[in-house]
Image (spheres, rainbow, N blue to C red):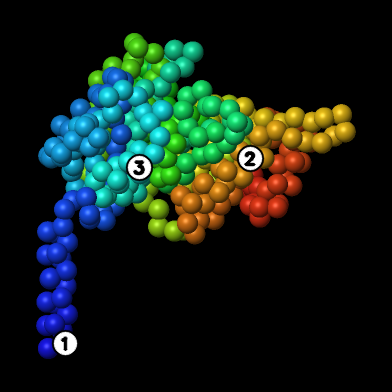
Amino acid sequence: MVRCAYDCEMLQACEQFLQMPQTRRTVMVSLILVSGGDIASTNQADELLKMCDWQRLEPVEGLDAYSYKHARMWWMKDGCLWEDDLDKRWTEATGEIPSEIIFPSRHSAASGNASLTLHPIGTMQVPEQDVPEYGGKAADCPPPNPRLASWWRELNRVGTGMDEFDLSLETTHHGPWIETPSLFIEIGSTSETWGHEGAAKLLAGIIYRGLGLDGGKGLGNWNGEGKVVVTLGGGHYAPRANMLGMHEHVWIGHMLATYALPFSKDEDGKISGMWENSIRKAIASTKTAYPGGDLVCSMDKKAFKGWQRQAIRDLLAELEVPLLKSAEIIG
């Protein structure tokens, strides 16, 4: 009788949930944000729409939205870099809570080299009183998406035939500001390649498999255990993270290029600059994305002067974050 009563209560609760308006349900979703004015973004989205039986939703903020399994796709009119609080805005409109946000996008580079890239977002090196040039919240960074390293390995697995494209992670940069773990997945680097349909299909396939929309488990599902690396120093295309992320047991957090760690020292030897804020925010944000993770840092020693390296070591000691050599991380 007790079991019967319990089953009846559970059935009644399920029926009440299903009868609730969508805006009142608490549902965790993977949100894909499409930039309507960006052909690299819309091509990836179009390929994704072909792969699944997406259902058109009621417009969200007057903009097209689609649903398939736990994934949602939301089309912005133009770009996303200055569209802050997209996670909160989705929740306010739908009642659903994004557990992660994926931004299919284009990548721009002065080199013009064709490229396929992945990266987290943030502008933690920008002083609070300044306005970041490419969106985001000054002096802060959203949590990185734990899928970064797994998707990086998948990009290398499926991208070997794309000989005209360089494959790379990028260090943390630009907006928008959100509080949800996120990543950008991009086609670069000029108008000659932004519309490349083969590249769009390849990246859409990574999103499709990576989110488990193919019926699989997905790629990069954080289970609370593992070594999580925040990289410090080096160039924008993250050579250290590119190498470390190829190892199956390594998870990648924020990646800070040398330019994101600006130092200064006065005549009295007092050290200042946004470098400390960058490291503190990157570590705190990465811990948020990887609860329970074994967080460590990896530093490109050649990117810094001796006094800068020591300042970084002292800060990491204060934060109780180990600074390890690559060989120690790889094992």
Q: Are marks 3 and 2 in contact (CB under 8 Å)?
A: no
Q: Which residue is drawn at 58% across and 28% down?
A: 130
* Tag 3 secondary structure: helix
- The residue that mark 2 highlights is 277
Disc 3 or 2, which lies upstream in sequence?
Answer: 3
From mark 2 to mark 1, how far is it between C-alphas? 57 Å
The residue carrying pointer 3 sits among few (fewer than 14), some (14 to 19) or many (20 or more) residues within 10 Å by Cα, namely many
Relative side of 88 to 149, left or right: left
Q: In this view, does 110 lie above or below 97?
A: above
Residue linked to disc 3: 87
Badge 1 crowding class, 10 Å Cα cut-off, few under 14, some 14 to 19, many 20 or more, is: few
Q: Is residue 324 left or right of residue 8?
A: right
The Cα–Cα distance between marks 3 and 2, rounded to whole angstroms, is 24 Å
Q: Do the residues labelled 1 and 3 touch (CB within 8 Å)?
A: no
**Circle 1: element type:** helix
Image coordinates for residue 50, horizontal then vertical, percent:
15, 32
Q: Earlier in the sequence, mark 1 or mark 3?
A: 1
| Residue at the spot 25% in from the left edge and 30% down from the top edge | 75
